[in-house]
Amino acid sequence: MQERRSRILALLGMGLVATLFGEPARAQQGAPPPAVLVQPAELKPIADQAEFIGRAAAVDKVELRARVKGFLGPRKFKDGDMVKEGQVLFLIEPEPYQAAVDQKTAQRDAAKAALTNAQLQLTRAEELLRTKTGTQVTYDQRLSEQLQAKAQLEDASAQLRDAEIQLSYTQIKSPIAGRVGRAAVSPGNIVGPDSGVLATVVSENPIRVLFSITQRELLDARRDTTSGDTLVVLLRLADGNLYKEKGKLDFIDVTADAKTDGQMVRAVFDNKDGLLTDGQTVRVIVEGEKVPTVVAVPQAAIAQDQSGPYLFIVNDKNVAEQKRVKIGVARDGLVAITEGLKAGERVIVQGQQRVRPGMTVNPSLAPPSASTQKQ
Protein backbone atom coordinates (compact mmCIF):
# COMPACT_ATOMS: atom_id res chain seq x y z
CA MET A 1 0.00 0.00 0.00
CA GLN A 2 2.81 2.38 0.90
CA GLU A 3 4.57 1.67 -2.37
CA ARG A 4 1.42 2.37 -4.39
CA ARG A 5 0.92 5.68 -2.54
CA SER A 6 4.48 6.73 -3.39
CA ARG A 7 3.89 6.05 -7.10
CA ILE A 8 0.69 8.11 -7.03
CA LEU A 9 2.47 11.04 -5.36
CA ALA A 10 5.26 10.82 -7.93
CA LEU A 11 2.77 10.94 -10.78
CA LEU A 12 1.05 13.91 -9.17
CA GLY A 13 4.42 15.69 -8.82
CA MET A 14 5.19 15.10 -12.47
CA GLY A 15 1.82 16.44 -13.44
CA LEU A 16 2.34 19.51 -11.27
CA VAL A 17 5.73 20.17 -12.89
CA ALA A 18 4.19 19.82 -16.31
CA THR A 19 1.49 22.25 -15.31
CA LEU A 20 3.92 24.83 -13.90
CA PHE A 21 6.64 24.63 -16.56
CA GLY A 22 5.49 22.72 -19.57
CA GLU A 23 2.48 24.77 -20.60
CA PRO A 24 4.11 28.22 -20.31
CA ALA A 25 7.10 26.95 -22.27
CA ARG A 26 4.80 25.81 -25.05
CA ALA A 27 2.97 29.12 -24.81
CA GLN A 28 6.26 31.01 -24.98
CA GLN A 29 7.31 29.10 -28.05
CA GLY A 30 4.06 30.11 -29.73
CA ALA A 31 4.18 33.84 -28.66
CA PRO A 32 3.52 36.33 -31.46
CA PRO A 33 6.39 38.55 -32.72
CA PRO A 34 6.75 41.80 -30.77
CA ALA A 35 5.09 44.82 -32.34
CA VAL A 36 7.40 47.72 -33.23
CA LEU A 37 7.04 51.05 -35.00
CA VAL A 38 9.38 51.71 -37.90
CA GLN A 39 10.23 54.69 -40.04
CA PRO A 40 12.26 54.72 -43.26
CA ALA A 41 15.58 56.52 -43.06
CA GLU A 42 15.24 59.70 -45.12
CA LEU A 43 17.52 62.14 -46.86
CA LYS A 44 17.18 65.43 -45.00
CA PRO A 45 18.96 68.80 -45.26
CA ILE A 46 20.72 69.16 -41.90
CA ALA A 47 23.40 71.78 -41.47
CA ASP A 48 26.61 70.88 -39.68
CA GLN A 49 26.92 73.25 -36.76
CA ALA A 50 28.86 74.03 -33.62
CA GLU A 51 27.53 75.71 -30.49
CA PHE A 52 29.38 78.03 -28.10
CA ILE A 53 28.69 80.25 -25.11
CA GLY A 54 28.92 83.92 -26.05
CA ARG A 55 28.33 87.35 -24.58
CA ALA A 56 26.79 90.38 -26.24
CA ALA A 57 28.92 93.53 -26.28
CA ALA A 58 28.00 97.01 -27.46
CA VAL A 59 29.96 98.36 -30.39
CA ASP A 60 30.42 101.64 -28.49
CA LYS A 61 30.21 102.15 -24.74
CA VAL A 62 31.01 105.45 -23.06
CA GLU A 63 31.26 106.34 -19.37
CA LEU A 64 30.32 109.95 -18.77
CA ARG A 65 32.50 111.76 -16.22
CA ALA A 66 32.90 115.33 -15.01
CA ARG A 67 36.04 117.04 -16.30
CA VAL A 68 35.67 120.23 -14.25
CA LYS A 69 34.58 120.83 -10.67
CA GLY A 70 31.28 122.45 -9.74
CA PHE A 71 27.70 121.97 -8.64
CA LEU A 72 25.72 119.58 -10.83
CA GLY A 73 22.79 121.31 -12.49
CA PRO A 74 19.49 119.94 -13.84
CA ARG A 75 19.59 116.55 -15.50
CA LYS A 76 18.70 116.62 -19.20
CA PHE A 77 17.50 113.03 -19.62
CA LYS A 78 15.53 110.21 -18.04
CA ASP A 79 17.14 106.93 -17.09
CA GLY A 80 17.00 104.56 -20.07
CA ASP A 81 16.35 107.24 -22.70
CA MET A 82 17.66 106.94 -26.23
CA VAL A 83 20.04 109.86 -26.75
CA LYS A 84 21.63 111.41 -29.82
CA GLU A 85 25.28 112.10 -30.50
CA GLY A 86 26.20 115.48 -29.03
CA GLN A 87 23.10 115.69 -26.81
CA VAL A 88 23.66 117.50 -23.48
CA LEU A 89 22.98 115.13 -20.58
CA PHE A 90 24.43 116.92 -17.53
CA LEU A 91 25.13 120.58 -16.70
CA ILE A 92 27.73 121.86 -14.26
CA GLU A 93 27.29 125.45 -13.04
CA PRO A 94 28.88 127.49 -15.85
CA GLU A 95 29.08 130.95 -14.19
CA PRO A 96 32.63 130.70 -12.72
CA TYR A 97 33.96 129.37 -16.01
CA GLN A 98 32.12 132.02 -18.03
CA ALA A 99 33.70 134.69 -15.83
CA ALA A 100 37.13 133.21 -16.54
CA VAL A 101 36.40 133.36 -20.27
CA ASP A 102 35.39 137.04 -20.01
CA GLN A 103 38.59 137.84 -18.10
CA LYS A 104 40.79 136.05 -20.63
CA THR A 105 38.96 137.78 -23.46
CA ALA A 106 39.82 141.18 -21.96
CA GLN A 107 43.45 140.19 -21.57
CA ARG A 108 43.54 138.99 -25.16
CA ASP A 109 42.06 142.28 -26.38
CA ALA A 110 44.63 144.26 -24.35
CA ALA A 111 47.46 142.18 -25.82
CA LYS A 112 46.05 142.73 -29.30
CA ALA A 113 46.05 146.50 -28.74
CA ALA A 114 49.61 146.40 -27.41
CA LEU A 115 50.70 144.48 -30.51
CA THR A 116 49.06 147.08 -32.76
CA ASN A 117 50.91 149.89 -31.00
CA ALA A 118 54.20 147.98 -31.13
CA GLN A 119 53.73 147.37 -34.84
CA LEU A 120 53.18 151.13 -35.43
CA GLN A 121 56.28 152.02 -33.41
CA LEU A 122 58.31 149.50 -35.38
CA THR A 123 57.08 150.92 -38.71
CA ARG A 124 57.99 154.45 -37.63
CA ALA A 125 61.47 153.39 -36.45
CA GLU A 126 62.00 151.57 -39.73
CA GLU A 127 61.07 154.71 -41.71
CA LEU A 128 63.37 156.89 -39.60
CA LEU A 129 66.22 154.45 -40.08
CA ARG A 130 65.64 154.41 -43.84
CA THR A 131 65.80 158.26 -43.99
CA LYS A 132 68.83 158.22 -41.65
CA THR A 133 67.01 160.34 -39.06
CA GLY A 134 66.77 157.48 -36.63
CA THR A 135 69.26 155.10 -35.10
CA GLN A 136 69.76 151.36 -35.43
CA VAL A 137 69.45 151.01 -31.66
CA THR A 138 65.99 152.54 -31.69
CA TYR A 139 64.89 150.26 -34.51
CA ASP A 140 66.19 147.17 -32.71
CA GLN A 141 64.36 148.18 -29.54
CA ARG A 142 61.07 148.70 -31.42
CA LEU A 143 61.48 145.32 -33.13
CA SER A 144 62.00 143.62 -29.79
CA GLU A 145 58.92 145.33 -28.37
CA GLN A 146 56.86 144.22 -31.37
CA LEU A 147 58.00 140.60 -30.97
CA GLN A 148 57.23 140.67 -27.24
CA ALA A 149 53.76 142.10 -27.90
CA LYS A 150 53.12 139.37 -30.45
CA ALA A 151 54.15 136.67 -27.97
CA GLN A 152 51.94 138.20 -25.27
CA LEU A 153 48.99 138.13 -27.66
CA GLU A 154 49.62 134.49 -28.45
CA ASP A 155 49.80 133.69 -24.72
CA ALA A 156 46.59 135.60 -24.00
CA SER A 157 44.85 133.82 -26.90
CA ALA A 158 45.99 130.44 -25.56
CA GLN A 159 44.71 131.28 -22.08
CA LEU A 160 41.38 132.34 -23.57
CA ARG A 161 41.16 129.09 -25.50
CA ASP A 162 41.86 127.12 -22.32
CA ALA A 163 39.14 129.03 -20.47
CA GLU A 164 36.69 128.33 -23.30
CA ILE A 165 37.54 124.63 -23.15
CA GLN A 166 36.93 124.59 -19.40
CA LEU A 167 33.60 126.31 -19.99
CA SER A 168 32.63 123.72 -22.62
CA TYR A 169 33.24 120.96 -20.06
CA THR A 170 30.34 122.30 -18.00
CA GLN A 171 28.10 120.70 -20.62
CA ILE A 172 28.51 116.94 -20.46
CA LYS A 173 27.44 115.61 -23.86
CA SER A 174 27.02 112.11 -25.21
CA PRO A 175 29.74 111.42 -27.79
CA ILE A 176 27.67 108.58 -29.32
CA ALA A 177 24.06 107.76 -30.10
CA GLY A 178 22.63 105.07 -27.87
CA ARG A 179 20.76 104.32 -24.66
CA VAL A 180 21.77 106.06 -21.45
CA GLY A 181 21.76 104.15 -18.19
CA ARG A 182 20.94 105.18 -14.63
CA ALA A 183 22.32 108.48 -13.37
CA ALA A 184 24.71 107.89 -10.47
CA VAL A 185 24.68 111.46 -9.04
CA SER A 186 21.69 113.68 -8.29
CA PRO A 187 21.54 117.39 -9.20
CA GLY A 188 22.90 119.76 -6.55
CA ASN A 189 25.92 117.66 -5.63
CA ILE A 190 29.46 118.86 -6.22
CA VAL A 191 31.14 116.81 -8.91
CA GLY A 192 34.60 116.80 -10.41
CA PRO A 193 37.17 114.60 -12.14
CA ASP A 194 37.30 112.35 -9.06
CA SER A 195 33.54 111.80 -8.82
CA GLY A 196 33.49 108.64 -10.90
CA VAL A 197 31.03 107.66 -13.61
CA LEU A 198 27.93 109.87 -13.79
CA ALA A 199 26.14 107.64 -16.33
CA THR A 200 26.92 105.17 -19.11
CA VAL A 201 25.78 105.33 -22.73
CA VAL A 202 25.82 102.20 -24.91
CA SER A 203 25.02 101.84 -28.58
CA GLU A 204 22.48 99.08 -29.28
CA ASN A 205 22.37 98.68 -33.05
CA PRO A 206 24.32 96.92 -34.36
CA ILE A 207 25.62 94.79 -31.50
CA ARG A 208 28.56 92.40 -31.25
CA VAL A 209 28.72 88.91 -29.77
CA LEU A 210 32.05 87.55 -28.53
CA PHE A 211 32.78 83.85 -28.06
CA SER A 212 35.86 81.64 -27.78
CA ILE A 213 36.62 78.65 -30.02
CA THR A 214 39.38 76.06 -29.92
CA GLN A 215 42.18 75.90 -32.46
CA ARG A 216 40.75 72.72 -33.97
CA GLU A 217 37.33 74.31 -34.46
CA LEU A 218 38.97 77.38 -35.96
CA LEU A 219 40.90 75.25 -38.47
CA ASP A 220 37.72 73.40 -39.47
CA ALA A 221 35.90 76.70 -39.94
CA ARG A 222 38.71 78.09 -42.08
CA ARG A 223 38.67 74.97 -44.26
CA ASP A 224 34.92 75.37 -44.76
CA THR A 225 35.40 79.01 -45.69
CA THR A 226 38.25 78.14 -48.07
CA SER A 227 36.04 75.57 -49.80
CA GLY A 228 33.52 78.30 -50.57
CA ASP A 229 31.00 77.64 -47.80
CA THR A 230 30.11 80.88 -46.05
CA LEU A 231 29.59 80.60 -42.31
CA VAL A 232 26.35 81.81 -40.74
CA VAL A 233 26.03 82.75 -37.07
CA LEU A 234 22.79 82.23 -35.13
CA LEU A 235 21.88 82.99 -31.52
CA ARG A 236 19.81 80.95 -29.10
CA LEU A 237 18.27 83.14 -26.41
CA ALA A 238 17.61 82.31 -22.76
CA ASP A 239 14.06 81.09 -23.54
CA GLY A 240 15.41 78.55 -26.03
CA ASN A 241 14.22 80.41 -29.12
CA LEU A 242 16.48 81.41 -31.99
CA TYR A 243 17.12 85.11 -32.53
CA LYS A 244 15.47 86.18 -35.78
CA GLU A 245 18.53 87.98 -37.19
CA LYS A 246 21.53 86.14 -38.62
CA GLY A 247 25.00 87.42 -37.81
CA LYS A 248 28.28 87.65 -39.67
CA LEU A 249 31.78 86.94 -38.42
CA ASP A 250 33.83 90.12 -38.67
CA PHE A 251 36.89 89.56 -36.48
CA ILE A 252 39.14 86.79 -35.13
CA ASP A 253 41.58 87.78 -32.42
CA VAL A 254 45.23 87.80 -33.40
CA THR A 255 46.34 85.85 -30.32
CA ALA A 256 45.21 82.64 -28.61
CA ASP A 257 44.76 82.14 -24.88
CA ALA A 258 47.72 80.08 -23.70
CA LYS A 259 45.68 78.57 -20.84
CA THR A 260 42.64 77.40 -22.80
CA ASP A 261 44.04 77.29 -26.36
CA GLY A 262 40.95 79.29 -27.30
CA GLN A 263 40.77 82.22 -29.67
CA MET A 264 38.24 85.02 -29.40
CA VAL A 265 35.83 85.38 -32.32
CA ARG A 266 33.40 88.24 -32.91
CA ALA A 267 30.14 88.35 -34.82
CA VAL A 268 27.89 91.33 -35.59
CA PHE A 269 24.08 91.30 -35.45
CA ASP A 270 21.34 93.79 -36.25
CA ASN A 271 19.55 94.76 -33.05
CA LYS A 272 16.86 97.15 -34.20
CA ASP A 273 14.34 95.94 -31.62
CA GLY A 274 16.88 96.16 -28.77
CA LEU A 275 16.35 92.53 -27.78
CA LEU A 276 20.08 92.01 -27.20
CA THR A 277 21.69 93.89 -24.32
CA ASP A 278 25.31 94.66 -23.58
CA GLY A 279 26.71 91.89 -21.34
CA GLN A 280 23.90 89.42 -22.09
CA THR A 281 24.83 85.71 -22.24
CA VAL A 282 23.69 83.83 -25.36
CA ARG A 283 24.37 80.53 -27.08
CA VAL A 284 26.13 81.01 -30.40
CA ILE A 285 25.46 78.57 -33.26
CA VAL A 286 27.85 78.58 -36.22
CA GLU A 287 26.88 76.64 -39.33
CA GLY A 288 27.58 76.61 -43.03
CA GLU A 289 25.35 78.54 -45.37
CA LYS A 290 25.17 75.53 -47.71
CA VAL A 291 23.08 72.84 -46.01
CA PRO A 292 24.12 69.27 -47.01
CA THR A 293 21.58 66.47 -47.51
CA VAL A 294 22.27 63.51 -45.22
CA VAL A 295 20.62 60.28 -44.08
CA ALA A 296 18.59 61.17 -40.98
CA VAL A 297 16.64 59.17 -38.39
CA PRO A 298 14.76 60.16 -35.21
CA GLN A 299 16.96 60.51 -32.16
CA ALA A 300 14.73 57.99 -30.38
CA ALA A 301 16.04 55.26 -32.68
CA ILE A 302 19.65 55.64 -31.50
CA ALA A 303 20.98 53.55 -28.61
CA GLN A 304 24.44 53.51 -27.11
CA ASP A 305 26.66 50.91 -25.50
CA GLN A 306 30.38 50.47 -24.85
CA SER A 307 31.01 49.89 -28.55
CA GLY A 308 29.26 53.10 -29.59
CA PRO A 309 25.93 54.08 -31.12
CA TYR A 310 23.68 51.58 -32.87
CA LEU A 311 20.12 51.10 -34.07
CA PHE A 312 17.80 48.34 -35.26
CA ILE A 313 16.39 47.99 -38.75
CA VAL A 314 13.77 45.57 -40.07
CA ASN A 315 14.70 43.73 -43.26
CA ASP A 316 12.30 42.54 -45.98
CA LYS A 317 11.66 39.33 -44.00
CA ASN A 318 10.59 41.33 -40.90
CA VAL A 319 13.72 40.26 -39.04
CA ALA A 320 15.44 42.78 -36.78
CA GLU A 321 19.09 43.57 -37.55
CA GLN A 322 21.46 45.59 -35.38
CA LYS A 323 23.53 48.19 -37.21
CA ARG A 324 26.49 50.08 -35.86
CA VAL A 325 26.40 53.66 -37.10
CA LYS A 326 28.36 56.87 -36.91
CA ILE A 327 26.27 59.90 -36.03
CA GLY A 328 26.66 63.56 -36.90
CA VAL A 329 24.81 66.70 -35.96
CA ALA A 330 21.38 66.46 -34.26
CA ARG A 331 18.59 68.96 -34.77
CA ASP A 332 14.82 69.14 -34.27
CA GLY A 333 14.55 65.54 -33.07
CA LEU A 334 16.59 64.13 -35.97
CA VAL A 335 20.18 62.94 -36.04
CA ALA A 336 22.39 62.66 -39.11
CA ILE A 337 23.89 59.24 -39.84
CA THR A 338 27.25 59.63 -41.51
CA GLU A 339 28.05 55.93 -41.84
CA GLY A 340 26.31 52.56 -41.47
CA LEU A 341 22.82 53.25 -42.83
CA LYS A 342 21.20 53.80 -46.22
CA ALA A 343 18.20 55.90 -47.09
CA GLY A 344 15.00 53.85 -47.22
CA GLU A 345 15.98 51.23 -44.65
CA ARG A 346 13.25 50.70 -42.07
CA VAL A 347 14.50 51.86 -38.68
CA ILE A 348 12.79 50.82 -35.44
CA VAL A 349 11.79 54.01 -33.61
CA GLN A 350 9.59 52.47 -30.89
CA GLY A 351 9.68 49.13 -29.13
CA GLN A 352 13.37 48.39 -29.75
CA GLN A 353 13.94 47.54 -26.09
CA ARG A 354 12.00 44.27 -26.67
CA VAL A 355 14.03 43.40 -29.76
CA ARG A 356 17.14 41.27 -30.11
CA PRO A 357 19.21 40.78 -33.29
CA GLY A 358 17.72 38.07 -35.52
CA MET A 359 14.26 38.27 -33.88
CA THR A 360 11.18 38.32 -36.08
CA VAL A 361 9.06 41.39 -35.38
CA ASN A 362 5.69 42.77 -36.38
CA PRO A 363 6.47 46.24 -37.86
CA SER A 364 4.02 49.08 -38.32
CA LEU A 365 4.73 52.43 -39.90
CA ALA A 366 5.19 55.09 -37.22
CA PRO A 367 2.99 58.18 -37.40
CA PRO A 368 4.89 61.48 -37.85
CA SER A 369 4.51 62.41 -34.17
CA ALA A 370 5.86 59.09 -32.89
CA SER A 371 9.12 59.47 -34.77
CA THR A 372 10.38 62.18 -32.48
CA GLN A 373 9.15 60.77 -29.16
CA LYS A 374 11.71 59.43 -26.72
CA GLN A 375 11.33 55.78 -25.80
Image (cartoon, grey):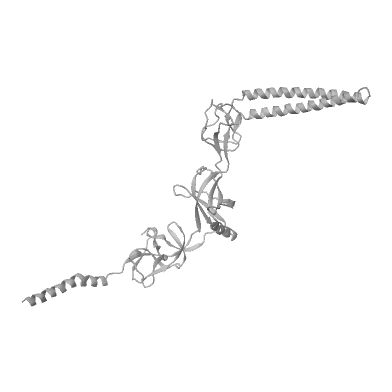
Which quarter of the picture shows residue 364? Answer: bottom left
Q: Position of residue 333 (x, y in %)?
A: 42, 57
Give x and y (percent) for residue 250: 59, 50
- Direction from residue 210 to residue 240 in the image, left or right: left
What quarter of the picture does the N terminus occupy? Answer: bottom left
Residue at 11% in and 73% down: 9
Q: Report x, y in % for residue 212.
A: 53, 51
Q: Is residue 230 left or right of residue 164?
A: left
Quarter of the picture holding the C terminus: bottom left
Q: Nearer the viewer, residue 291 or 367?
A: 291
The image quadrant that residue 230 belongs to is bottom right
Give the farthest residue toward the left.
Answer: 1
Residue 297 sits above or below residue 117 on the image: below
For the point 84% across and 23% down, the residue is: 120
| 105 over 46 or under it: above or below | above
- Left or right? Give the position of 244 relative to 302: right
Q: How many marks?
A: 0
Q: Is residue 214 above or below residue 272?
A: below
* Of the pair 139 and 280, the residue shown nearer to us: 139
Q: Position of residue 188 (x, y in %)?
A: 54, 25
